[in-house]
Image (spheres, grey):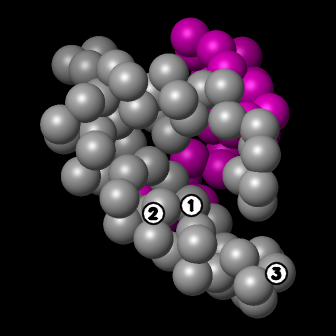
């Protein structure tokens, strides 16, 4: 998830995420991935705070920060991943 300078949230996922996650988690993640863009338009700050501290289930936040420029791997992933 990226937060742009205008307060908009952008959700990026691995293009083959369905092949990476466990089969039993696909429906759950698919529902979340459909819900995130809707919730980001209605309550972007609340969603950002929630996702920034998520730590249960198949999604765990590993890093939260202000800028990705100091993390070359994240910068590279940004161009490979697809937007929801």
Task: For marks 1 and 2, give the one nearer the viewer.
Answer: 2
For label 3, count other residues whose C-alpha is less than 10 Å away and answer few (under 14), some (14-19) or many (20+): few
Quarter occupied by residue 64: top right
47 left or right of 25 in image: left
Alpha-carbon distance for marks 3 and 1?
Answer: 15 Å
Assess whether residue 54 is covered by the magenta stretch.
no
Assess whether residue 73 is covered by the magenta stretch.
yes
Q: Earlier in the sequence, mark 2 or mark 3?
A: 3
Q: Are marks 1 and 2 in contact (CB under 8 Å)?
A: yes
Q: Which residue position holds label 3? A: 22
Q: Is residue 17 above or below residue 72?
A: below
Q: Which mark is residue 29?
A: none
38 left or right of 31 in image: left
Q: Nearer the viewer, residue 31 or 1?
A: 31
Alpha-carbon distance for marks 1 and 2?
Answer: 9 Å
Tell me where the magenta segment starts and ends, as one range. Answer: 61-83
Q: Residue shown at 78%/76% (left/top)?
A: 21
Residue farthest to the top, as pictured: 66
Task: State the SS at label 2.
Answer: helix
Q: Earlier in the sequence, mark 3 or mark 1?
A: 1
Q: Residue shown at 34%/35% (left/top)?
A: 9
Q: In the picture, which quadrant includes the C terminus?
A: bottom left
The answer to whether residue 15 is seen in the rendering is no
Where is residue 12 drawn, in percent x and y?
50, 53
Task: State the SS at label 3.
Answer: loop
For label 1, count other residues whose C-alpha is less than 10 Å away and answer few (under 14), some (14-19) or many (20+): some
The total of numbered circles placed on residues is 3
Q: Which residue position holds label 1? A: 13
Q: Which residue position holds label 2? A: 33
Q: Are marks 3 and 1 in contact (CB under 8 Å)?
A: no
Q: Is residue 20 above or below residue 46?
A: below
């Amino acid at each position: 998830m990226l937060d742009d300078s205008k307060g908009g949230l952008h959700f990026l996922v691995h293009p083959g995420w369905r092949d990476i996650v466990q089969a039993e988690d696909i429906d759950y993640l698919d529902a979340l991935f459909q819900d995130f863009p809707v919730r980001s338009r209605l309550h972007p700050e609340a969603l950002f705070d929630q996702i920034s501290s998520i730590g249960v289930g198949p999604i765990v936040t590993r890093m939260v920060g202000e800028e990705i420029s100091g993390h070359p791997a994240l910068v590279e992933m940004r161009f490979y991943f697809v937007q929801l």
